[in-house]
């Protein structure tokens, strides 16, 4: 369903005003082993009327496929489309409850940093289209920023940082310098170790357990400090 919604968005006239990023982008585009539900985007100038119309476009296209669809568009603070699909889980024999709904959120926020999105082909689950996505160096740098700037620290951010390094991503120090005053790997190493020294990563790993299939993958969180010590210098 996520891929269908991505197809609708990037086949629309607003495709070049959005860049796909976040945990679901890592899973769909780079095969991250952590599950993620919401579709997150940086805005490249989409306005409120266009965003509201995008919600209508998503609803109309899903209904053409025979689905019942409920759409709720929110435009206060960050932009959000809540897409609820009733009865599908029942029809697929996944849930015994007729009215249980699938919920997928489309979240759009102003980009923190000026960049040129990558153009990639999405070819999954009968979906084939070109999409715009945030480059890996920016994804990694955003994750580093987010890890210690949420209201509540979450294991998924540390999981994703280690995953991104594992697929060859390197930080964008222009981004990190702008947001955190970090200019190089030496300063990044110091920042990550200082900020994480009071964190119980064994406890934090429990945050990730419902989102992974292989329990051993939680070591990306448990061993985060050792990873930093061994790989960032």
Image (tube, rainbow, N blue to C red):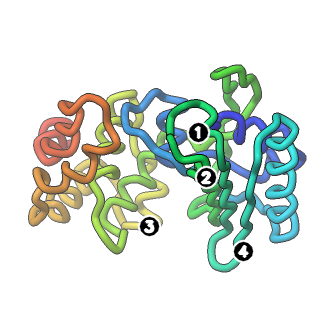
What number is the disc on residue 99?
A: 2
Q: Residues within 10 Å of mark 2 (few under 14, many from 20)?
A: few
Residue corresponding to mark 1: 90
Mark nearer the viewer, 2 or 3: 2
Residue 171 pos. (x, y %): 40, 45
Which comes sooner in the sequence, label 2 or label 3?
2
What number is the disc on residue 108?
A: none
Which comes sooner in the sequence, label 1 or label 3?
1
Residue at the spot x=25%, y=29% of the render?
214
Do the CB atoms of the residues marked 4 and 3 lie less than 8 Å apart?
Answer: no
What number is the disc on residue 75?
A: 4
Residue 2 seen in this snapshot: no
Which comes sooner in the sequence, label 4 or label 3?
4
Q: Rounded to the nearest whole Å, what is the CA distance between mark 2 and mark 4?
A: 27 Å
- Above or below, 211 against 153 in this view is above
Q: In the displayed structure, does residue 72 sit left or right of residue 138? A: right
């Amino acid at each position: 369903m996520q891929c269908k919604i991505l197809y609708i968005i990037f086949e629309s006239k607003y495709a070049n005003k959005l860049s796909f990023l976040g945990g679901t982008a890592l899973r769909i585009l780079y095969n991250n082993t952590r599950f993620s539900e919401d579709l997150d985007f940086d805005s490249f100038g989409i306005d409120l009327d266009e965003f509201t119309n995008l919600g209508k476009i998503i609803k109309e296209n899903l209904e053409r496929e025979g689905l019942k669809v409920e759409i709720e568009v929110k435009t206060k603070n960050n932009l959000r489309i809540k897409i609820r699909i009733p009865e599908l889980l029942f029809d697929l024999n996944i849930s015994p409850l007729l009215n249980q709904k699938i919920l997928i959120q489309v979240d759009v926020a102003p980009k923190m940093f000026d960049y040129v999105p990558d153009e990639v082909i999405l070819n999954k689950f009968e979906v084939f289209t070109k999409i715009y996505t945030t480059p890996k160096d920016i994804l990694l740098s955003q994750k580093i920023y987010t890890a210690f700037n949420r209201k509540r620290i979450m294991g998924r951010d540390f999981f994703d940082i280690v995953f991104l390094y594992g697929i060859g991503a390197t930080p964008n120090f222009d981004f990190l310098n702008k947001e955190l005053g970090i200019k190089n790997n030496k300063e990044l190493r110091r920042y990550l170790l200082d900020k994480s020294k009071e964190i119980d990563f064994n406890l934090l790993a429990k945050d990730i357990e419902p989102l992974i299939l292989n329990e051993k993958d939680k070591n990306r969180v448990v061993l985060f400090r050792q990873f930093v010590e061994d790989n960032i210098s």
